[in-house]
Image (cartoon, rainbow, N blue to C red):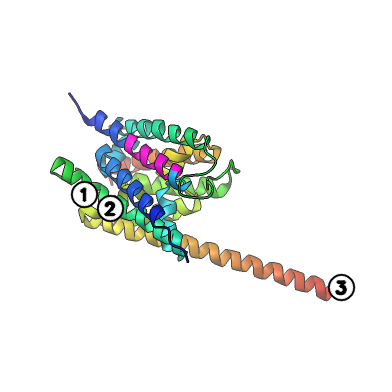
């Protein structure tokens, strides 16, 4: 049986659990772009908490390694400059749009925020278009 | 400055669960993310299950939070209200989507991927931080220019009076 779907569903449930716990414990949206932005700003207590969340994110693949005796499989196909350009767009865009896949996607859709629904529809559309164009021109 | 260690610990724990979820789900694999976005080509639907699983649990958590006076470790909830859909939101989401489609990485998986010590993830995260800083400086300069011009208008009005 193909376990891929099951792992995706279980992994998604864990992402949802982390978001729910962060809301119930700290009263905040677990939006990773906002958490990275908060780590870069020098506001003492907030900065520490945001940095702690990011340290936890780094630990995630290590827990996977301890559980499955291998690192999570990843495939990077593009040239290095593509990742540089993509990173710039992701950093700038998520700050301008106040969120990414976690803040607008997982948290925003769950609370039926109109802004988040509009944001998710927009980034899915431009993401799909970008992949289609890159495939068409062979990048 | 007061530092709340229970809150920092909670953030660390939530980050670790989140990161493990990312690793388990396949969201850390750029090829699979781009496959999910490739609806016009070789579409890989598995990551739809990530969103479904995440939304189900996250929505339950949100419903529970609505019945609480305040979160367990904080004095109040900090959840944004129903704001206006403006050009900034749409332009920002559009740019993010282009970057997401190009690299197959969004901020969470990108940070987690640093643990795999891959040059591509490192370059992506450095560029992402640069993008964040460029945006934040641009906004700070814009706010300064706005307050300067409004101060000048006020001074001109005084001079006319």
Question: Marks 1 and 2, Cα distance to the nearest angstrom?
Answer: 8 Å
- State which mark lies toward you, 3 or 2: 2
In the rendered structure, the answer to whether residue B119 lies left or right of residue A137 reads: left
Label 3: few (<14), some or many (≥20) within 10 Å? few
Q: What element carries label 1?
A: helix
- Which residue has dot 2 on it? A58
Residue A116 at what x, y percent from top left? 50, 40
Q: What element carries label 3?
A: loop
Asked if marks 1 and 3 fall on the same chain, the answer is: no
Residue A60 at what x, y percent from top left? 26, 47
In the rendered structure, the answer to whether residue B88 lies left or right of residue B147 reads: left
Residue positioned most to the left: A69
**Magenta residues, start to end:** A13-24
Q: Is residue B143 in the magenta section?
A: no
Label 1: few (<14), some or many (≥20) within 10 Å? many
Q: Residue A40 carries which label?
A: none
- Which residue has dot 3 on it? B161
Residue A95 at what x, y percent from top left? 47, 54
B47, A59: nearer the viewer? A59
In the rendered image of this protein, does residue B35 appear above or below residue A1? below
> Residue A13 occupies which quadrant of the picture?
top left
A87, B80: nearer the viewer? B80
């Amino acid at each position: 049986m193909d376990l891929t779907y099951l792992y995706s569903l279980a992994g998604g449930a864990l992402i949802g659990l982390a978001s729910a716990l962060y809301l119930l414990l700290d009263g905040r949206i677990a939006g990773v772009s906002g958490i990275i932005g908060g780590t870069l700003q020098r506001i003492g207590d907030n900065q520490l908490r945001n940095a702690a969340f990011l340290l936890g994110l780094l630990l995630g693949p290590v827990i996977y390694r301890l559980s499955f005796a291998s690192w999570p499989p990843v495939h990077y196909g593009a040239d290095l400059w593509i990742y540089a350009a993509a990173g710039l767009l992701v950093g700038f865009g998520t700050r301008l749009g106040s969120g990414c896949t976690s803040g607008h996607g997982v948290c925003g859709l769950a609370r039926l925020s109109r802004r988040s629904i509009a944001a998710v529809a927009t980034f899915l559309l431009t993401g799909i278009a970008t992949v289609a164009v890159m495939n068409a021109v062979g990048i | 400055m007061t530092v709340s260690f229970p809150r920092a610990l909670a953030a660390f724990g939530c980050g670790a669960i989140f990161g493990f979820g990312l690793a388990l789900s396949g969201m850390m694999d750029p090829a699979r993310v781009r496959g999910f976005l490739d609806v016009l080509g070789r579409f890989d639907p598995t990551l739809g299950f990530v969103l479904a699983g995440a939304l189900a649990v996250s929505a339950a958590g949100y419903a529970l939070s609505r019945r609480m006076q305040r979160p367990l470790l904080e004095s109040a909830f900090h959840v944004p209200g129903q704001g206006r859909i403006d050009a900034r939101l749409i332009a920002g989401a559009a740019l993010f989507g282009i970057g997401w489609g190009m690299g197959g990485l969004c901020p969470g998986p990108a940070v987690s991927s640093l643990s795999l010590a891959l040059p591509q993830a490192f370059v992506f995260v450095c560029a992402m931080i640069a993008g964040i800083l460029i945006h934040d400086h641009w906004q700070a300069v814009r706010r300064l220019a706005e307050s300067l011009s409004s101060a000048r208008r006020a001074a001109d009005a005084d001079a006319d009076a």
